[in-house]
Image (tube, helix red, strand yellow):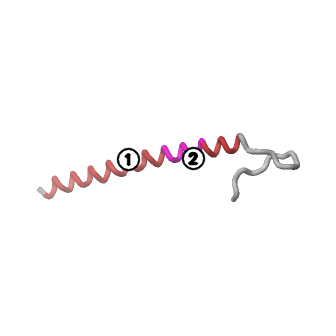
Amino acid sequence: MVPVLLVLLLALILFGAGFAVKVLWYIAIAVLVIWLLGFLVRSTSPSGGRSRWYRW
């Protein structure tokens, strides 16, 4: 009975980790798209050059 419970627990942990990794990939892709859009549509500075759109 204990080995079956251990196998089920392992499967549950691996499923949870796989789901978390998939969600993190979606978040990473969304951040990349937002960053690229911000890079492409950044405004010009008063001197005519391109300004930074981020604060760091």
Q: Earlier in the sequence, mark 2 or mark 1?
A: 1
What kind of element bears circle 1? helix
Amino acid type, mark 2: Val
Residue 15 x/y as whole percent: 32, 48
* Label 2 close to label 1 by CB (< 8 Å): no
Judging depth in this view, the residue of 55 and 29 nearest the camera is: 55
Question: Residue at coordinates 53% horizontally, 47% vertically from top-left?
Answer: 28
The picture quadrant where one finds residue 22 is: top left
- Quarter containing the C terminus: bottom right
Relative to 6, residue 42 above or below: above
Residue 56 shown left or right of residue 22 in the figure: right
- Residue corresponding to mark 1: 19
Residue 31 shown left or right of residue 2 in the figure: right
Residue 9 x/y as whole percent: 24, 55
Q: Give the distance between the C-alpha atoms of the residues marked 2 and 1, in whole angstroms.
A: 19 Å
* Start-end of magenta stretch: 26-33
Residue 39 x/y as whole percent: 70, 44
The picture quadrant where one finds residue 43 is: top right
Q: What secondary structure predominates along the stretch shown in magenta?
A: helix
Q: Is residue 53 magenta?
A: no
What kind of element bears circle 2? helix
Judging depth in this view, the residue of 7 and 52 nearest the camera is: 52
Relative to 9, residue 42 above or below: above
- Residue corresponding to mark 2: 31
> Is disc 1 surrounded by few (<14), some (14 to 19) or many (20+) residues within 10 Å?
few
Question: Residue at coordinates 40% horizontally, 50% vertically from top-left?
Answer: 20
Question: Residue at coordinates 54% horizontally, 43% vertically from top-left?
Answer: 29
Residue 15 shown left or right of residue 28 in the figure: left
Q: How many marks?
A: 2
The picture quadrant where one finds residue 3 is: bottom left
Residue 32 x/y as whole percent: 59, 44
